[in-house]
Image: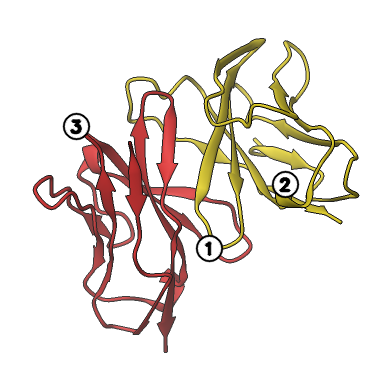
Amino acid sequence: AQRVTQPEKLLSVFKGAPVELKCNYSYSGSPELFWYVQYSRQRLQLLLRHISRESIKGFTADLNKGETSFHLKKPFAQEEDSAMYYCALYNFNKFYFGSGTKLNVKP
Amino acid sequence: NAGVMQNPRHLVRRRGQEARLRCSPMKGHSHVYWYRQLPEEGLKFMVYLQKENIIDESGMPKERFSAEFPKEGPSILRIQQVVRGDSAAYFCASSPAGTSGGGGEQFFGPGTRLTVL
């Protein structure tokens, strides 16, 4: 069965520090993975998808099939990065979301 | 484009009443998805609809829950005879086409927070 696990409910870092939000998945096929973000008082929105291999707002995420992970990284966190982050796996009509990690970037 | 609209934003019902949640997709989008988020949990897929068709309802509870997306008007998620365990945030998302094949982005509404007393 498909499952997405985000082990950290809350991650606090100082501004300028590196940040890594962990995401592990269980899926037998070739996964399609996404990161969604929800800023305070805003809607959930797409941050990036692994097939695009893009960097958005300085964030990157690499799919590691061996470790079944899709961790989200940024070398230098900014205060405006504070938000809820959700990892999601897509499989035939459905997205499976993790429980989310709240990132708090302190000044 | 106003984005995905959901109403009401907050809904309070007593046990046994019916709850109706509405979702208007973005202009030009014909595919709608409903999710439920229980406290401290992630979003859980409920149902995927196209205009006048239910494509995938594998995430819907077998009883009391139903969804529709008529040719005209918003998509409706209906919960009959609500119980306390139905209290949650319900999110709707839309896309211009099905995400079948992958890579598609879903655009989310602000959610409806249902409280059952």
Other-residue count near label 1 (Cα within 10 Å), few / some / many at <14 / 14–19 / ≥20? some
Q: Chain of mark 2?
A: B
* Three-letter residue code for mark 3: Ser
Residue closest to the eye, A73 or A97 = A97
* Three-letter residue code for mark 1: Tyr
Instruction: Tell me where residue B39 appears, x and y as whole percent.
Output: 61, 60
Q: Residue at x 64, y 13 (%)?
A: B51
Which image quarter: residue B65?
A: top right
Q: Earlier in the sequence, mark 3 or mark 1?
A: 3
Which disc, if any, is residue A93?
Answer: none
Which hue is chain B drawn in? yellow
Q: Which chain is red?
A: A
Mark 2–mark 3 Cα distance, whole angstroms, equals: 34 Å
* Three-letter residue code for mark 2: Asp
* Residue A103 vertical position relative to residue B114 in the rendered view, above or below: below
Q: Is residue B54 left or right of residue A34?
A: right
